Structure formats: C-alpha cells, structure tokens
Image (cartoon, rainbow, N blue to C red):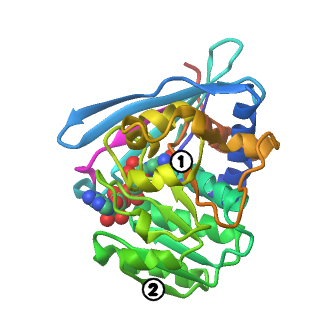
C-alpha cells in the first residue's frame, strides 16, 4: 500500500481537483452507483469526538474509510484540532491500497461541496457573499466560492469577532472587499455560507432575503445547529445525502420538529445528473445541507494517490 503523508497533499490535490472529484461522487450517488455506510461518531469526553465515515463507489472503484475527529486540546500541542486519515481498499479483494493524510483533504472536499451548491443553486446574478463563521474551514470555503462566482464583496459575521480579520485577509488575497457586519445585514447577501461549530441557531429567517442560496456546512453531528428551523422549513432543501441530512445535518432539528420530511430534501447529485432542475425561481431560498459524506473523502484521497503514484511520491509499504 502507498502512504501519502499530509505534507504532500497541498502539491498533489488542487481546489479544482476536489471540485471535480466531489461532483463526480455526488453524481455517482444520484445514479445509485455509490453509497455511504452509516456514520459512526462517538464523544470521547472533554470535547473530543472520534468517528468513521466510509462508503463504496462501484463506478469509481473506491472502497474505504476516513477515521478521525476533533481534539480540542491539540492547539496547545501545536497541531490542528481536526485530525483525520483516509484508508483506501481494493473493492474486489479488500486489500488495503493506501493510507492518506486527511486534514487538508477534508477542508478541500468540504469547500468543494459548498462551491458546487453555490454554482448550481445560487442565482446567476449573485454578487454579495455572506460568511457566517471564521474558523479553520472558513478561508477554504471563501476561496472555493470565489472560484465559481464573480463576487463584488464579502460580508462576514462570527460569534468571536476577533477571528474575522483572518477571513478578511483571505478576501483581500482574492481582491474582494470585506466588511464585518451584524447578522441582520446578512439580508444583503445573495449567497451565505455557514461554517461554525454552533450548538444553536445563529442565522434566523429574518436575516435572509428571498432568492438567497444558503450553503450550511458546519452542522455535521447530532446536536449542532446553525440555522433557525423556520428558515430550513421555508427553504427548498438540497443535501449531499438525505440520510445524513435528517440525522446529523442541519435538517435534523426541522425534521424533529415535524417541519420537514426526508422526502422534501433533494440530493445535489440529482441536480448534477439533470434528474432535478434545481432552483425554480428567483425568489426561492435554496439551502444546501452539507453534512460531509465518506465518499467525498475517498474521492479526493484517490486523486492524491493517483498523483503520488504518477510522480513517484509517497511511501510504499507491504502490510
Ligand atoms: P474551528 O474550530 O476552526 O472554528 C469554529 C467556528 O465556529 C468559529 O467561527 C467559531 O467562532 C464558531 N463558533 C464556535 N462556537 C460557536 C457558537 N456557540 N455559536 C456560533 N458560532 C460558534 O472549526 P472549523 O474547522 O472551521 O469547522 C467549523 C465547523 O465545520 C465544525 O462544526 C466542523 O465540525 C464542521 N465541518 C463540517 C464538514 C462537513 O463536511 N460538513 C467538514 C469539516 C468541518
């Protein structure tokens, strides 16, 4: 098997690679050629979370698992709080084929999913991007969104305002004016990305105007919430995977309150394959519930492995 260390990933996988890989995966899921296995996620105490996301893509010849989680004590150790590794296996024999550093890949595949939703569901004339959240993932999200639309400006809100200047730096790098705003001013945005680890809704229905696209990316576990259930109920809902959306995604709370049903949620893959037409009107609020599926991880890890093999990089080991 090939070991592809974290340090190599930045040179092996680009944002465009991640975008293409995630689009292909979502389309394969919509065609029933690929499916995710149920997520395992455990609280280890002291804020630590650990789990497994896995799946099989028959079309892409991918079988594997991402193991990892969130370890809040890591900052003090000088390493990132999110730690993950992707393991790939030969779907025919079950033999391990690769072990790949999964930290940067997670950020790239998550940002790619959000950008894909913006590209397919935001109004063509969208010009103002709203950012709710300013942590590690937020910069990746902003960069990916800038690849799919020509924004005039970016407005941002974060519960911890001291984190916003770092996001403003990313906007400046992209040549985009950035303004820190109160949540009420999110009503100026044509598309809003939420990427926080919040346990309660920040973005309310009154903060969002008609025709906005929301990419809700932070809620990936039971108990997290970024958006008021009334806003979820009001929006036309899309997701990476319906089963995850209603259990660990943003839709979990609206579902529990009886405001939406699984049948109300469309997989983004169906929009990619043309099975669903996507946005229906300029007034509709569209909401992509990006829960993060294992197949996204396998898809970007497979790109890393293919590139590493092409260039003779990585460490080959016999198990
Ligand atoms: P981070 O720890 O770097 O940043 C956390 C962010 O959440 C900051 O903006 C912080 O201010 C904000 N926040 C914290 N507590 C809050 C509260 N009570 N209310 C509102 N905001 C609050 O985390 P990150 O790496 O940027 O990840 C952000 C979220 O995205 C996490 O929940 C993470 O699990 C999730 N995530 C989702 C996917 C996916 O595929 N959907 C992938 C990776 C990460």
- Residue 307 in picture, x, y percent from top left: 73, 45
- Label 1 residue near ligand 1, CB within 8 Å: yes
User: Relative to residue 151, is residue 154 drawn left or right?
Assistant: left
Question: Which secondary structure lies at badge 2?
Answer: strand
Quarter that holds the N terminus: top right
Residue found at x 34% / y 34%? 50
In this view of the protein, can residue 239 be seen by the observer? yes
Farthest residue in the top direction? Answer: 93
Residue behind mark 2:
179
Specify few, some or many for label 2: CA neighbours under 10 Å numbering under 14, 14-19, or 20 or more: some
Quarter that holds the C terminus: top right
Residue found at x 61% / y 80%? 174
Residue found at x 47% / y 51%? 232
Residue found at x 58% / y 39%? 264
Distance between mark 2 and mark 1 Cα atoms:
25 Å
- Residue 53 in picture, x, y percent from top left: 49, 31
Seen from the viewer's position, the closer of residues 47 and 263 is 263
Picture quadrant of ligand 1: bottom left
Residue range in magenta is 66-74
Residue behind mark 1:
290
- Residue 303 in picture, x, y percent from top left: 70, 43
- Residue 155 in picture, x, y percent from top left: 48, 79
């Amino acid at each position: 098997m090939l070991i592809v260390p974290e340090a190599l990933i930045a040179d092996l996988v680009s944002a465009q690679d991640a975008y293409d890989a995630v689009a292909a995966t979502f389309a394969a899921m919509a065609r029933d050629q690929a499916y995710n296995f149920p997520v395992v996620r455990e609280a280890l105490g002291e804020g630590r979370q650990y789990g497994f996301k896995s799946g099989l893509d028959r079309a892409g010849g991918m079988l594997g698992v991402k193991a990892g989680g969130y370890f809040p004590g890591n900052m003090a150790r000088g390493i990132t709080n999110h730690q993950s590794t992707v393991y790939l296996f030969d779907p025919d024999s079950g033999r391990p084929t690769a072990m790949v550093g999964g930290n940067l890949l997670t950020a790239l595949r998550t940002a790619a999913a959000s950008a894909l939703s913006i590209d397919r569901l935001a109004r063509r004339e969208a010009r103002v991007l709203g950012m709710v959240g300013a942590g590690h993932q937020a910069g990746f999200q902003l960069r990916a969104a800038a690849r799919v639309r020509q924004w005039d400006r970016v407005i941002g809100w974060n519960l911890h305002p001291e984190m916003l200047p770092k996001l403003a730096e990313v906007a400046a790098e992209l040549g985009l004016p950035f303004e820190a705003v109160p949540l009420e001013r999110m009503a100026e945005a044509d598309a809003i990305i939420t990427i926080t680890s919040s346990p309660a809704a920040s973005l309310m229905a009154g903060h969002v105007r008609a025709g906005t696209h929301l990419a809700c990316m932070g809620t990936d576990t039971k108990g997290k919430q970024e958006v008021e259930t009334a806003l979820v109920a009001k929006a036309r809902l899309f997701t990476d995977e319906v089963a995850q959306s209603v259990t660990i995604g943003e839709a979990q709370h609206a579902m529990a309150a009886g405001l939406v049903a699984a049948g109300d949620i469309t997989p983004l893959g169906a929009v990619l394959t043309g099975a669903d037409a996507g946005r229906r009107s300029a007034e509709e609020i569209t909401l992509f519930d990006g829960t993060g599926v294992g197949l996204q991880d396998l898809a970007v890890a497979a790109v890393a492995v293919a590139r590493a093999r092409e260039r003779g990089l990585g460490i080959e080991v016999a198990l």
